[in-house]
Amino acid sequence: MSKPLNAIKAKVQALRAYSLSSDRASIKLNQNENPWNLPPEIGSEILRRVNERPWSRYPDFHARALHERLAEFAGWKADGIIAGNGSNELIQALLMVTVGSGTRVLISEPTFALYRQITTVLGGEVIRVPLSSKLTYDGEALRRAIESASPQVTIICSPNNPTGCVIDPKDLESLLEATRGLIVIDEAYHEFSGESVVPLLRQHPNLIVLRTFSKAMAMAGLRVGYLLTAPELAQEIAKAVLPYNLNVISQTAAQVAVEMYESTLKPLVNLICAERDRVYERLKEIKGLEPVPSRGNFMLVRSAMSPRLVFDELLRRDILIRDVSAYPMLGNYFRISVGTPEENDQLLASLREIFGSVDTPL
Ligand code: PMP
């Protein structure tokens, strides 16, 4: 028999796996999670509701109660919503129903690596438009790429992971008009920007919005995300989602979280935004560092010292950040997530110590 690996598509073999360093530290600023745990009143209400239900029964096939809660929360139609096992699952589902051999998918880079990964696995062709030199969206360049490449799908992450930039609403409208394909806006971090494109769904049947419970909602461990789009499109994308993709605990947790969002989670989001702005100002004062303005709960920092060295130095001080220097355009950058005020103070103190002796201008 020939080598088993020959059965794997060459383009898949050429891909670097989407992965994360296995390092651990007490101060965890590497995955853009909510630094506070889920508020206890949400946790106890989830457990109370779950305990009332027989464990032996499947979840509701249609997840109707959850879809209705999400519809009220987001201001969209329940039949235009799909809940998923994290928004990752929904990125995969929507690419599965749109991408085949040679299908063109347009993205800006640097961005969240999974779009490129799944498109490539499915045999699609990724068209890349670089961000501007300020690491912001280049609306003009995106429009030109849509006109010349006519992609089936365009994916825009806003706020963008890892740069924190948002797409200008006017640019987005112009892209929605220019394309003959679908435009996906990944709003994983929208709560931290105070903006959403959900109101545009009404006029644009080719718009798909993705959201997650892993960031502002403080539920990364429960794996919940959702997709909003025109009901006709939602019906098609749902064909690539497995039955009962979302277990009873996660479904219940998501319902309780949206019911209690304003009173329990929103104040934490406001605190994270205030901390983000404080950390940005403090980082500017450290010689050798240049933070990039961000609308998410994270930010890039340009570094005069090798990002790998900064990563190692911080890890020695029990702080874990993300080395993003292998991303396009980001050779001199690392990314930090915004932590609690105490965690941020420790990060800042450590960076002051590490960069205390740096005299290389940026
Ligand atoms: N989209 C973006 C932009 C992300 O940064 C992430 C997680 N890092 C996801 C989607 C995936 O989130 P989830 O936990 O909902 O699968």
Image (tube, rainbow, N blue to C red):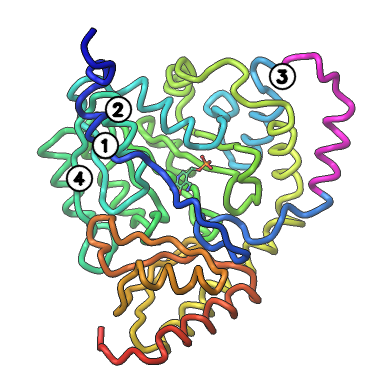
- Identified by mark 4, the residue type is Arg
Residue 121, disc: 2
Q: Residues within 10 Å of mark 4 (few under 14, many from 20)?
A: some
Q: Residue at x 23, y 39 (%)?
A: 106
Q: Are marks 2 and 1 in contact (CB under 8 Å)?
A: yes
- Magenta highlight on residue 51: yes
Q: Is residue 179 left or right of residue 242?
A: left
Q: In what element is the residue under mark 1?
A: loop
Disc 3 versus disc 4: distance between alpha carbons?
Answer: 40 Å
Residue 59, disc: 3
Q: Are marks 3 and 4 in contact (CB under 8 Å)?
A: no
Disc 4 versus disc 2: distance between alpha carbons?
Answer: 16 Å
**Which percent across, then down, holds residue 101?**
21, 20
Q: In what element is the residue under mark 3?
A: loop
Q: Nearer the viewer, mark 4 or mark 2?
A: 2
- Identified by mark 3, the residue type is Pro
- Identified by mark 2, the residue type is Val
Disc 3 versus disc 1: distance between alpha carbons?
Answer: 36 Å
Segment colored magenta: 42-58
Instruction: Classify the position of the C terminus by image quarter.
Output: bottom left
Quickly name the residue at label 1: 15
Q: Mark 3 vs ligand 1: CB under 8 Å?
A: no
Q: Is residue 3 left or right of residue 36?
A: left
- Identified by mark 1, the residue type is Leu
Residue 128, disc: 4
Q: Earlier in the sequence, mark 3 or mark 4?
A: 3
Q: Earlier in the sequence, mark 2 or mark 1?
A: 1
